[in-house]
Amino acid sequence: MCAGFFVIQPNTNEMKLLVDSGSTKADWIAIDANGKVLFTTQTLGVNPEVLDTTEIIKRLDAKFDILHNKDKATNLFFYGAGCGTDRMKNYLTEVFQNYFTNAKIVVHEDTYAAVYATTPKNEKAIVCILGTGSNCSYYDGKVLHQKVQSLGYIAMDDCSGNRFGRHLIRGYYFNEMPAELASKFEKEYDLDADVIKQNLYKEPNPNAYLAKFAKFLIQHKDHPFCKKYIDQEMEAFVTYYIEQFEDCKEVPVHFIGSIAFYLKDELTAVLSKRGIQIGNVLRRPIDGLIAYHILN
């Protein structure tokens, strides 16, 4: 056995694979029947809206722990971006069933992972994801409800990492970004037009590529140029997503994702101004999923 890798021994009877996947990356945890962690790993994101079967399998095969334990998995609980429609769920379920041949496959949209990680059992809440992409759902204590059907990163994803990346690139190329900020931006990223177009139009996961630029916005969040986009996107997210639900001022609003986590103070200020109560804000839900699946 190679150092640093873990192979499940044949006498292991149950292995649950828990996966929280955004478009950029996916966290994988394997647990046994008692909730003991067998291994953890991370792959590139598995979003069925932007990846074909070949690319998905390539991303799974790239990780030793997944490849060498795929026939030992008894259950796969996958919570992923891009899994909000039955067509995408069914497509990804088929891909996984052919790969994890002995496992029972359950595919949910990523919001369910956010719900299980942030919301006490049977409590009502609005649960939002602000990461590479964005969405917002209402949880009535049992069932998840959505008022807005996502159309993906080009048409929607307000207040997401990829939306902020788009603003920065456009601001830079339209010469709206102040010179001192543009100089720092140039040192941080390869802004050659051919490189950007290659990543946007010819490479997988253009939304994840755009989201990489959001780190720069967070680092310079107090700069007026960046603050303008943060305020603009947060206001739009509240208006078009959260306020779709009539009792948004009566229930807590929970958040998952790096954008929400690192811009929590700004988010709290915008919500407070609207009379909305911010709830739990977590960077990623995977640890909460372990506790949930031990009990369920």
Image: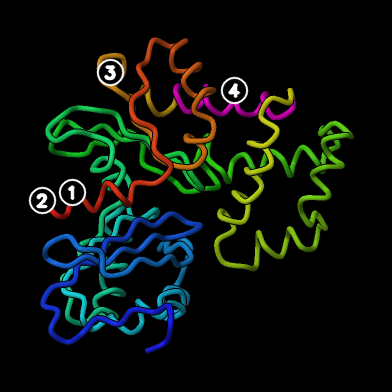
Residue under label 4, please give it.
231
Q: How many marks?
A: 4
- Which residue occupies the extreme bottom position in the image? 1
Residue under label 2, please give it.
295
Mark 1 in CB contact with mark 2 (< 8 angstroms):
yes
Quarter where residue 174 is shown:
top right
Quarter where residue 251 is shown:
top left
From the image, state whether disc 4 or disc 1 is nearer to you. Answer: 1
| Mark 3 vs 2, N-terminal side | 3
Q: Residue at x 42, y 60 (%)?
A: 26
Q: Position of residue 80 (x, y in %)?
A: 35, 55
Residue under label 3, please give it.
246
Alpha carbon distance from label 3 to label 2: 32 Å
Residue type pointed to by label 2? Leu
| Mark 4 vs 1, N-terminal side | 4
Residue type pointed to by label 1? Tyr
Alpha carbon distance from label 1 to label 3: 29 Å
Residue type pointed to by label 3? Glu
Q: Nearer the viewer, residue 139 or 236?
A: 139
Other-residue count near label 2 (Cα within 10 Å), few / some / many at <14 / 14–19 / ≥20: few
Residue under label 1, please give it.
292
From the image, state whether disc 2 or disc 4 is nearer to you. Answer: 2
Residue type pointed to by label 4? Asp
| Mark 2 vs 4, N-terminal side | 4
Whether the magenta-drawn stretch holds residue 213 is answered as: no
Q: Give the label on residue 135, or none.
A: none
In this picture, is 190 found above or below 242?
below
Alpha carbon distance from label 1 to label 2: 5 Å
Quarter where residue 105 is shown:
bottom left
Q: Which residues are magenta?
A: 225-239
Alpha carbon distance from label 4 to label 1: 34 Å
Whether the magenta-drawn stretch holds residue 228 is answered as: yes
